[in-house]
Image (cartoon, rainbow, N blue to C red):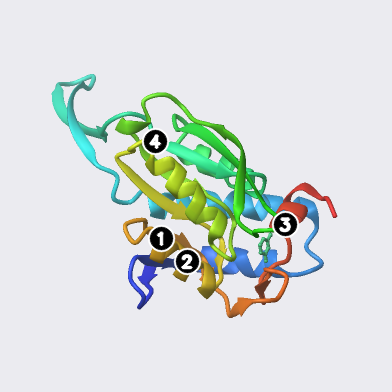
Amino acid sequence: MSTEHPSGNVHVITHPLVQHKLTLMRRKDASTNSFRRLLGELSTLMAYEITRDMPLSDIEVETPLETMTGKVIDGKKLVLVSILRAGNGFLDGMLTVVPGARVGHIGLYRDPQTLQPVEYYFKMPSEMEERDIIVVDPMLATGNSAAAAVAKLKELKPRSVKFMCLLAAPEGVATLQKAHPDVPIFTAAIDRELNDHGYILPGLGDAGDRIFGTK
Ligand code: URA
């Protein structure tokens, strides 16, 4: 259950359970425990939506009664790529519904001089050219890290790339779509704007701090 954003390849997941849980997560007095639990539940629900068009192939299966042709997910295992560190908050919930998925990690920090993302960690499964990728990061803020991560992943020539976040700022959507118009964005909401410190308004604060209980 999602609606297409007028700007194109952006899907806002409008399922009532997703919207309800997102609102609970936004509350400033949500504990680390409940924030993390809600993120886990939300990522399971969002994983269900984002995998809706995964290609299937036919296989023969023997039931206790006869042989039939069944459907299975086609190709090599899906890869979930977490943008460190907040992206890790999405992994457990998504792996609940796609337990065989492989997991990659990308670490990026913002250079204080150029304000551009600089990579400090990159670890992916093998045979990426035969795989579908879902890049996960709860907050699509400026979009610079997401765009850089997708550019780096495209060098590995994967079969497809999608991007999944919890909240997006219009600025982040524009940046990622401009750099990678072929990459669909799945989000639970598009908020109003970014503030001068790069936080999404109204947002939910620092997703990494809220997931890990740091400050
Ligand atoms: N990252 C966050 O964790 N929160 C924001 O609002 C923006 C970027």
Q: Is residue 204 left or right of residue 43?
A: right
Amino acid type at image mark 1: Ala
**Occupied quadrant, residue 19:** bottom right
Amino acid type at image mark 4: Leu
Q: Where does residue 26 sit, x and y in percent of width and height?
A: 69, 68
Distance between mark 2 and mark 4 Cα atoms: 25 Å
The residue under label 3 is 112
Element type at mark 1: helix
**CB-based contact (under 8 Å), mark 2 and mark 4:** no
The residue under label 1 is 179
Indicate which disc, 2 or 4, sits on the residue closer to the N terminus: 4
Q: Nearer the viewer, residue 198 or 7?
A: 198
- Tell me if mark 1 has few (under 14), some (14-19) or many (20+) residues whose alpha carbon lies within 10 angstroms of its own: some
Element type at mark 2: helix
For ligand 1, the image quadrant comes to bottom right
Which residue is at 65% across, 60% downward? 115
Indicate which disc, 3 or 4, sits on the residue closer to the N terminus: 4
- Discs 2/4, front: 2
